[in-house]
Structures are given as C-alpha cells and as structure tokens.
Amino acid sequence: MTGDAEASFAQRDVYLDWNATTPPLGSVLDAMREGAAVAWGNPSSVHRTGRDARKVVESAREAVARLCGVEPRDVIFTSGATEANNLALQHAPALVTSRLEHPSVVRVAEALAASGVVVRWVPVPETGALRVEDVVEALVGLPDGFVVALMAANHETGVLQPVAEVSRAVLDRGGRLHVDASQAAGKVVGELWRAGDTVALAAHKLRGPKGIGALALRSSGLPRPVILGGAQERGIRPGTVDAVAAAGFGAAAFHAEHGGPERYGALAPLRDRLERAATPRARVNGTAPRLPHVSNLSFEGWLGDELVAALDLEGVRTSSGSACSAGTVERSPVIESMLGRARAESAIRVSLGDATTLEDVEAAISVLDRTTARRTSRG
C-alpha cells in the first residue's frame, strides 16, 4: 500500500463498535421529531393530547411485536435490555445460566445466589457455544418454575447459542426460557432468537434511541415487577412511557424487520477480510457459528484496552469488552470463561454495521496492521 493511501486511510473516522451502540437511522430521527411535535402528552391521560401520545406508543408497540412475532399486548416497554433482563429473572425460583451472559444477567444470578436461590452455572466450551447436554444436566432436580437465561448471540464474540434446542428441553421439563436477544434481533433470522418465553431487546442496538427497550412475552403468565407504581405496561413496568423514544423504537424495529438479516449477512465477507488480515498477529476468539458482523481478536503482547486506545488515536473505534464494563480494569469474563486469562487480557472486539463499507474495513486493516507491527518490531 502506498504512503498516500495509508495517509488517507489514517484520516478516516471508522466506527467499528456497533455492538456497543448503533448510529440512529434518519427515519428514526424523523419519527422522534414528529413524535416530539404531536405526542408530548402523557399516554395515560384520557384527553385528546394524551390519546395522541398513546397512539404513537401503540403504533411502536405493534412494530416491535411484529419484529418479535408476538401480539402487541405482549410487548412491555422498558428502559432497555438491562431492565428487561432484570424483570424476567429477579423473581426466578431457580436459575440456570452461564458466564457468557451480559452483566445484567450475571449480576442478577449472583444476587439470587447470595439470597439463597439455587443458581447453576453451565460450563463454557472454548468454542463459545453452550452444549445443550450441559444445559439439560443443569436442570436435574430444580423446583417447578425454574428459569434458564440464554443470550441468543454473545455481545463480545457474536457466537450464536442453541436457543431453539434449549427451548425444547426447558419446555419438556416445565421451566421457562429467557432470551436476551439484544445483539441478535434484526441481525439474524427470528428462528435463532425468538423461542424464549420472554425475550429482551434494546432499541439502540437496532439503530434506534437509547433509553428504551422491551420485554416480549411468548407464553402465559406475567413476570413480577421490580419497581412498584402505577398500572402502565400492564402493571409490570410502572412509569410514564416516553412516546418520543417509543416512536424511534418503532421506526428502528420496522427497519430491522424489513431486510435486517440480509443487510447484516452481507457484512460477513468484510468481517472475514479483516480477520484474514489480522490473524498473522491475532487469534480469533469464538469458533462456533456467529453473527456475520462481529470478530473478537486476541493480540499477543498487547493488553486489549491499550490496543483499543492506540487504534482510537488513529481514528478506528473498537472496544475491549462489553460497553457496560467500560472504565473498569476487569478483563473480559466472557473470553476468560472460554479461553483463559491471557486471551481475555489481550482481546478486542470489532463489530461492523449495516453502514460499514469496504473502504472502512480497508482503513481499519491499515491502521491495525501498522499499530500492531510497531509493538512486534520492538520485541
């Protein structure tokens, strides 16, 4: 590559942290602007202004319901997937999960265990995909109504979990399956993430706004609320629903439903191109089937957060783990559970999006190659 080309690439601002959050769509911003103008009222008020806001909220609920394959009344709006996960799990009489899960699941599991609830941790293979037989073994002897928490796609590696197979095993044994579909919805076909009795989503993972998500209910029975108040959202999630955020969520859900898996599927060659360029110096973490736009790479001789900072100085935005753990010195518990401490300490996550171009990837490769070569040349 010529020096001029390298210089032009270095000047690009390349965002490759789509798993942390996604840039809002133009249609999302338009929907929110319109919502702010006509739906600023309280959706629970019975007068005309309130009914205008309620109409916007219910239209968004219908869009999210179509994405999830449920009835609109079975979509509960929340502040995000973290709250949705807490709603689904905090009152579980027994819980089965793994260290692959998002902190909003792992922390709940740890709190339940500390309170005396039976919590069983499924072992994590090096591939990053749980074995169905290990999940089934963990179900033996659990009390009625137990819950299994299983993310559809891992937030750090993109590895897909066996949601449909686990769902059948849990149903056969009288339990409930909760699926965190934050990273999978709109990226892969619904059959890979919809099978939970409860399903958590976050709008900002779908090119929607932050601060709103949903818990979709696919079976009878309602979760118990974790905060108490009014009767909004069927009494499960009290508090006034933000109609403006809901409008944005609805627009994002519509976009995800219409061609989302195809758009993300087209990113696989770009992700693979980046991995081929990186693997002389890096190892890929997560070898099971995975999302087409995510790569987790460990670079020997680097700390992940140091490499992320070095790439950031060159205009390439990546991450060294879950954004919810940013600002801590904790190495990735996901990668450590799969492959050990050293791989976890040296790991970075690269996640593309449906606006990522070949030019973005080539620019990132140029910066990554130049940056990691400097460390190698020093010794």
Image (spheres, rainbow, N blue to C red):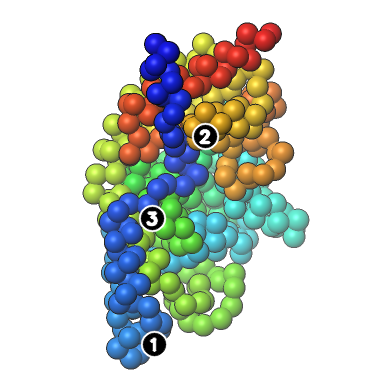
Q: Are marks 3 and 2 in contact (CB under 8 Å)?
A: no
Name the residue tied to disc 3.
208
Q: Amino acid at mark 1?
A: Ser
Q: Amino acid at mark 3?
A: Gly
In this rendering, does residue 276 appear at all? Answer: no
Residue located 32% across and 66% down the image: 33
Residue 332 - label: none
Residue located 49% across and 31% down the image: 316
Q: Nearer the viewer, residue 346 or 6?
A: 6
Q: Residue furthest left?
A: 258
Name the residue tied to disc 1.
45
Q: Position of residue 31 (x, y in %)?
A: 30, 64
1 or 2: tag closer to the N-terminus: 1
Residue located 48% across and 82% down the image: 231
- The kind of secondary structure element at disc 2 is loop
Q: Nearer the viewer, residue 39 or 214?
A: 39
Would you say 71 lies left or right of 149 here? left
Alpha carbon distance from label 1 to label 2: 44 Å
- The kind of secondary structure element at disc 1 is loop
Residue 318 - label: 2
3 or 2: tag closer to the N-terminus: 3
Q: Residue furthest bottom?
A: 47
Quadrant containing the C terminus is top right
